[in-house]
């Protein structure tokens, strides 16, 4: 027999009765607030084509690196989860078998945010009342598969059910944005915008970088064999993205290093990386220069700039060689911001009309670097805990370490940063509950009045993100 699956109404709230009561009252203000999702990785084709989602395993297991990295750590082969090999080698093709394998290992997720999100999805979306396990695998599979075939589970219907006010996807500058163009003329009222992610034409270590530059020139009609033409191509493509709703750019660099080279120096560096095989130092310097160039362009066109720094991508060569990039083997690294950002901040840090949102995977810099930086420079804001840290404890640590110096006003609320569409309401619910718990403790320790906490919790649930991302 599988254990009952029940979502406790006071989950994540403090145990102290008086503090819990405050948290409950705050939560009532935001429980049903619209979802603002200003940064994420859902597929715009879902909204444009509005076709039924596939089977439970293909929807919930195979695309979610939170799930398969945990299973892989316990000896489950990615082939047995149906993940495609680069060489076309055999993998499991029966989604029910994949689901059974996931279900029999579901206990591995105890205490993780993945468990919180999935339990929320199972209960609130599918009405499942048994904890996922080997014995409940087939029953839960059938329930989910049956509902995914219904009209009310089409992507647009779920968008409306989730009460999403706006959601941002993330696309390469080489993307034609066909789905976004289709959405603009579809007559559907859901608001889906794109985000400019130039990494494929900014990072010399990116696969097929030289060919990407060639395509970049063809798409824009700019001469990307010259540095001036290359920068013009970015300006052209940014304008194209803005036509499709973009208000932000995103930069996933291995470090937060910036540079402010002279035009001759930058031109010479571009010529070196464009011709191929730059040194590691050249590649890092070019990425650093391009962060500063992107900041300059954001000051021109008003797009918000996000810097997601500090991930060592594809740490496991066996997985990378067999399955490709972004397969659960990315690792956080120590990341410097105070020194790394100084060239950019020397030029643009005092610009109140510029917004640069900083993210980190290095929690040691919250109090030492990020909070003081955002608490001083008008151009800087702090993004919410990201990736490995968008968890109950991760969000709590962020509030404890950053708010005293940066204040709430220099943060941007919450974003779910996910491709797991069904988990979006769950992720926002967890974030809102953690914020309610944090604010309730401030109220009961007499650090602020409950009226102030009420104003802040509403801002954290949506208005801070809308303002920061100019939505």
Image (tube, helix red, strand yellow):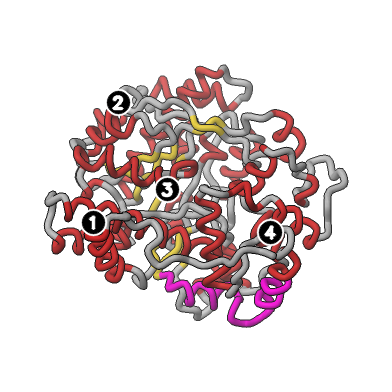
Question: For this view, does 173 lie left or right of residue 326?
Answer: left
Question: For this view, does 85 lie left or right of residue 440?
Answer: right
Query: How many C-alpha atoms fall within 10 Å of the one at disc 2: few (<14), some, or many (≥20)?
Result: some
Tag nearer the camera, 3 or 4: 4
Mark 3 and 4 residues: CB-CB less than 8 Å, in contact? Answer: no
Residue of label 1:
440
Q: Nearest the camera: 119 or 398? A: 119
Q: Report the predominant secondary structure element of the magenta stretch.
A: helix
Residue of label 2:
338
- What span is in magenta? 142-164
Give yes or no for residue 468 being in the magenta stretch. no
Residue of label 4:
133
Q: Answer with the quarter of the image where residue 38 lies.
A: bottom left
Residue of label 3:
249
Mark 2 and 4 residues: CB-CB less than 8 Å, in contact? Answer: no
- Judge whether residue 412 can be spotted in this image: yes
Question: For this view, does 365 lie left or right of residue 449?
Answer: right
- In the image, is residue 167 above or below residue 203? below
- First of labels 1, 3 by sequence position: 3
Q: CA distance from mark 3 to mark 2?
A: 22 Å
Helix, strand or loop at label 1? It is: helix
- Judge whether residue 244 can be spotted in this image: no
- First of labels 2, 1 by sequence position: 2
Query: How many C-alpha atoms fall within 10 Å of the one at disc 1: few (<14), some, or many (≥20)?
Result: many
Whole-percent x, y for residue 58 in the image: 71, 60
Tag nearer the camera, 1 or 4: 4
Q: Answer with the quarter of the image where residue 343 lies.
A: top left
- In the image, is residue 206 above or below residue 268? below
Q: Residue at x 66, y 62 (%)?
A: 59
Helix, strand or loop at label 3? It is: strand
């Amino acid at each position: 027999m599988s254990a009952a699956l029940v979502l406790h109404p006071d989950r994540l709230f403090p145990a102290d009765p008086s503090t819990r009561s405050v948290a409950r009252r705050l939560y009532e203000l935001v429980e049903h607030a619209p979802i603002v999702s200003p940064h994420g990785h859902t597929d715009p084709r879902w909204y444009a084509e509005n076709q039924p989602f596939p089977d439970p395993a293909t929807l919930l297991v195979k695309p979610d690196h939170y799930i398969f990295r945990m299973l892989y750590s316990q000896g489950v082969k990615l082939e047995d989860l149906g993940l495609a090999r680069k060489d076309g080698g055999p993998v499991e093709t029966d989604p029910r078998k994949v689901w059974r394998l996931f279900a029999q290992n579901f206990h591995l997720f105890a205490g993780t945010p993945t468990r919180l999100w999935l339990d929320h999805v199972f209960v609130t979306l599918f009405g499942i009342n048994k904890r996922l396990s080997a014995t409940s695998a087939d029953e839960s599979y059938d329930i989910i598969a049956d509902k995914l075939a219904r009209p009310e589970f089409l992507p647009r219907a779920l968008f409306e059910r989730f009460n999403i006010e706006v959601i941002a996807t993330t696309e390469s500058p080489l993307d034609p944005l066909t789905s976004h163009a289709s959405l603009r003329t579809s007559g559907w009222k859901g608001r889906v915008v794109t985000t400019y992610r130039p990494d494929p034409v900014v990072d010399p270590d990116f696969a097929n970088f030289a060919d990407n530059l060639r395509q970049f020139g063809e798409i824009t009609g700019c001469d990307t064999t010259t540095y001036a033409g290359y920068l013009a191509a970015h300006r052209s493509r940014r304008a194209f993205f803005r036509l499709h709703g973009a208000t932000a750019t995103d930069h996933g660099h291995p470090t937060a290093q910036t540079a402010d080279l002279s035009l001759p120096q930058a031109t010479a560096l571009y010529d070196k990386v464009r011709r191929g095989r730059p040194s590691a130092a050249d590649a890092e310097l070019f990425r650093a220069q391009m962060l500063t160039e992107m900041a300059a362009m954001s000051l021109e066109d008003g797009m918000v700039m996000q810097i997601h720094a500090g991930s060592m991508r594809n740490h496991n060569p066996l997985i990378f060689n067999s399955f490709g990039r972004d397969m659960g083997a990315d690792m956080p690294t120590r990341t410097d911001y105070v020194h790394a950002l100084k060239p950019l901040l020397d030029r643009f840090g005092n610009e109140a009309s510029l917004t640069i949102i900083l993210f980190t995977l290095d929690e040691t810099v919250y109090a030492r670097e990020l909070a003081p930086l955002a608490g001083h420079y008008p151009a800087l804001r702090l993004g919410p805990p990201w990736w490995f840290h968008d968890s109950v404890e991760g969000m709590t640590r962020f509030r404890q370490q950053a708010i005293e110096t940066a204040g709430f006003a220099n943060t941007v609320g919450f974003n779910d940063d996910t491709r797991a569409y069904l988990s979006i309401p769950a992720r926002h619910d967890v974030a809102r509950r953690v914020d309610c718990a944090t604010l309730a403790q401030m109220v009961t320790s007499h650090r602020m009045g409950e009226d102030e906490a009420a104003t802040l919790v509403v801002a954290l649930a949506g208005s801070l993100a809308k303002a920061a991302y100019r939505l």
